[in-house]
Image: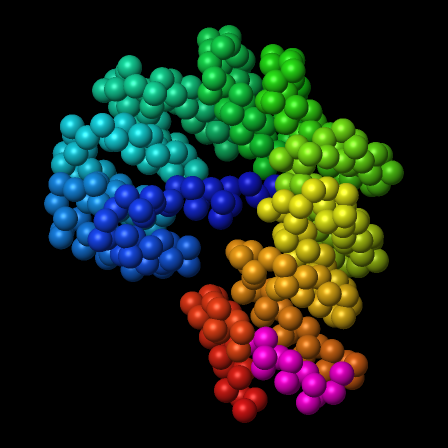
Amino acid sequence: MIIKFVSATILSIVLFIPFCCLGEEADEFRQAELYNKKKEYTNAELIYKLIVTNNPGTKSAFTAQKELVIVNILMGNDSEAEMALGKLKNDFMDDSNLPEALELIAKRYRWEKRFTESKRLYQEIIQNYPNTSPGDRSRLEILRVDIFSALESGDYAVAQTIVDSLLTNFPAHPHLPLILYETARRYESLDKFNEGKRIYQQIVDKYPGTTDAVRAMIEINKTDAIIYMQSGNHTAAQTEIDKIIVNYPNHWSTPWVLHRLAKEYIGRADQLEINDTNEQAKIYLQEAIDISEKIVNNLPQSSATPNAHSSIGDIYRRLGEYQKSLIYYQKIVDEYPNFDQAWNVLFMIGRNYNNLKEKGIISAEEANEKTHAVYALLLNKYPDCKAAASAKEWIEHHK
């Protein structure tokens, strides 16, 4: 199972705009961000172009021009991205924020696995802004690009050689722990868990007693749990999970590490179902429920808590236990109205009512009444969400 760690969280960081600082154009930027979240990049591009045209030379134009580069990278429009980048550099060559904007664009290229473009831009930052923070970080980032490129090509020995050179040449650099950590995560994304564990151990050995070392120790327990899980040794995997909870109950990363572990179990269940081993898949799904329950019941409340409730609701729904699923979904509706997937939870609640109707557990009248209420709430609170059209269609057909 591959850990998907380049997610909506990362995208939101890239596309984050400090609206309060952008004057009258704040509403336009907000609308563009909504389009970006829905991956309607062409619409976002039109807004950014309008801002640039109407506000030449301003902070808003600078931000919009930067976002034009990024949105064209996301759309795969290479020539347009290059032209937008050239305009950004030409129009704002004296802007003190330009180096950081270029660094952000280089990162976006890296996240999209456009390693050649990313490396070229980091080289430009190093050459043109050597004494700035972006210039300093870029000396390490350019090696990170080489590591990720080597990993993508399967050149694991080359990647490890570059990691070793980072440790040798930048031993005290404050940016190094982050690069090592994300390199370990990249190994994990390729199912190279032992290699990832080795890098986590290097962090522990190099930075003893630091917050970076503590985080790496949590990741080592997580990695061991995954390795045991993949071998079918559920008892040993559970021991590693319990170590995380007992030793690091208040660490900010603990609930998210457990959430990733639960997703690993779900992924393993997916693989087993493909191979028609459904009973084995149910074992892994129950393990995922148990891990998510630990997030809810054994750890302090955090931003991962509603995710855990949602995961449990999804799994029970998958297992056909719709009433149990409703309990966990309803918890999100009642206590976590700002959860970023609340719209999907509402939609799934409606689906559950229909499933209960089909199984004869509740009457058609009750199911339709409750589904209508929850879909009306969805349309009222999240009119632009992905489920809005389906919810509206259901209501139209059940008047």
With respect to residue 358, does 271 lie above or below?
Answer: above
- Residue at (65% x, 15% y) in the render: 209
Quadrant of the frame with the N terminus:
top right
Classify residue 376 as left or right of residue 73.
right
Write down the quadrant of residue 117 in the picture: top left
Residue sitting nearer the eye, 198 or 53: 53
Q: Position of residue 6 (x, y in %)?
A: 51, 42
- Residue at (33% x, 23% y) in the render: 134
With respect to residue 189, does 387 lie above or below?
Answer: below
Bounds of the magenta segment: 362-375
Write down the quadrant of residue 120 in the picture: top left
* Residue 372 shown in magenta: yes
Quadrant of the frame with the C terminus:
bottom right
- Count of marks placed on residues: 0
Whether residue 367 is visible to the viewer of this picture, yes or no, is: yes
Write down the quadrant of residue 250 in the picture: top right
Q: Position of residue 264 (x, y in %)?
A: 69, 44
Q: Position of residue 47 (x, y in %)?
A: 24, 56
Give the dominant element type of the magenta stretch: helix, strand or loop: helix
- Residue at (68% x, 61% y) in the render: 331
Residue sitting nearer the eye, 200 or 2: 200
With respect to residue 318, does 352 lie above or below?
Answer: below
Residue sitting nearer the eye, 148 or 96: 96
